[in-house]
Image (spheres, rainbow, N blue to C red):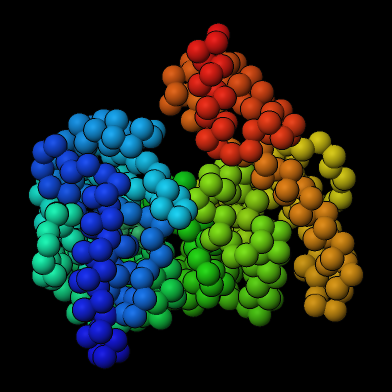
Amino acid sequence: MHQREERGGEFMVSNLLGVSRLIFKWIPPPPDGKAFLVGGLVRDFLLSGYGPPDLRDVDICLSGDVLKWSERISKNLSCEVIFEPRFNTARFWVKHGRDIHVDIAMARTEVYESPGALPIVTPATLLEDLGRRDFSINAMAWPLEEVGDCQDRLIDPFGGREDIHSGVLRVLHRNSFRDDPTRMFRGFRLLSRFSFKWEEGTQSLLSEGVSQKSVLTISGTRIRKEFVRIFLEKEPVDVLKRIYLSGLMWSLFPKAIWSQTLEGSLLEVVWLVKMIFGGSVSSLLPLKWSLLREWCHGETFFYLPILKELPSEDLESGIRFFGLEGKVGSILKDVISEPSVSSGKEMNPGKFLRVISQHVVETGSRYGWLMPQSRMDDRKNLLSRLSSFSENILKSSFISGEDLLRMGIPGGKRVGEMLKSVDERVREGKITSREEALQWVRSEMLRT
Ligand code: ATP
């Protein structure tokens, strides 16, 4: 580990410099204030040791005016920069081999008025911004400056580099899990991904959080977001296993225990989702990410075995806990309580989900929960049905209602009509990418 860190140190400095230069090629410098690379990317440069980390998501923290900078970026790159005034954030995509997602956020502090509540956000210094973060390894920054030398400029006020060196995950203060219990789930995700351990003090704070059932203070929507991110990990079953074995699930649902059946079903789900969508689940990012979130194909698969293992009296509260009320929840309930088959010809997301779920469950109930390895023919059959469904559905996912509202189309009927027209063109093969879909909407707006 030590050797990796030494080589990694050198590597990190030259590569972070390389990345900052690359970023300056894409983005003009901010008109005021200073910009810093923060979060996962800085961490991954330190962790990567010998090779460059995956440059897919770039988080930038700005001590300055985000709106002014985003206007300048939009003009220079002639690209769509989405500014979010409520949070003072901006995001956009740049092409560098593939699409890289850049997020800019104003440096801020967060004050939690009550445990689990959303924080009150105020502008702050970079150090304060780093101090509101989840773990020391995620609380480092690298200034984005035009510099010629190879100096190590890492800003690391909480000892993140040392914690990476020791392979531990450490919260920044005693109230961290109480303020925001989603950090427990985030922590298990990172532990599994990097094969890290909890730092001793953090481990006892986690045990306190588990016994106080602090996750009950967060909304279902936030829990669900964290679970989607778990499902997108390379080894989602390992993350879930760690969560169950820590007692976190058990403290909420006393009968939710980790069993071989549950593990087997979840592994089947991972396999199924990989087969349907191709490659790893995370290959769905970034274009299909919104699809996954909105229509939840993969997500729904994962919840099936988790919820099915709960006793029937816990099903409702399970659905509420995961924030699955509404359409997805009622489908899950239907599917779990009364598996039945229907054949879906009509391609809309709800129908798609229902058919897939019902089909999986129906096949599962005939052959034991999901299919055992031995029924390869049935698997193949199911897969070809699933992949043709998903192929059609994936094609029609380039833009959402949110995109249209952001582009200035008034809400209501017009949004639905526009989405329908985009879908029709996608099906006819006239629109084949998000850019084309956005372009078509723009031309329609000018025309009408
Ligand atoms: P990943 O590799 O999983 O994407 P990431 O660290 O980039 O990891 P994000 O969720 O994109 O994860 O968050 C970016 C940064 O924002 C994190 O590195 C962390 O510093 C901070 N952060 C995110 N969620 C929280 C949270 N709940 N509490 C405190 N800080 C958070």
For the N terminus, the quadrant is bottom left
Q: Ligand 1 appears in which quadrant?
A: bottom left
In the image, residue 413 sits, relative to residue 309, either above or below, namely: above
Q: Position of residue 313 (x, y in %)?
A: 64, 57
Q: Is residue 201 visible?
A: no
Residue 143 visible in the snapshot: yes
Query: How many discs mark residues in the rendered view?
Result: 0
Q: Position of residue 113 (x, y in %)?
A: 22, 45
The front one of 88 and 260 is: 88
Work out whether residue 262 or residue 147 is closer to the camera in this orientation and state it: 147
The residue at 50%/66% (across/down) is 233
Which quadrant holds residue 436?
Answer: top right
Q: Residue furthest top?
A: 448
Position of 310 with respect to 390 (left or right) is: left
- Most foreground residue, 329 or 90: 90
Residue positioned 58% across, 44% down in the render? 291
Residue at screen point 49% across, 63% down: 230
Quadrant location of residue 258?
bottom right
Instruction: Give left or right: position of 161 versus 306.
Output: left
* Left or right of residue 36, residue 297 in this image: right
Residue 204, x across and y down, in percent: 28, 77
Image location of residue 393, percent across then percent down: 70, 43
Image point 43% across, 68% down: which residue?
189
Query: Residue 78, relative to residue 37: is it above or below?
Result: above
Please state, as top left, top right, bottom left or bottom right, where the C terminus lies in the image: top right
**Of 44 and 256, which appears nearest the observer?**
44
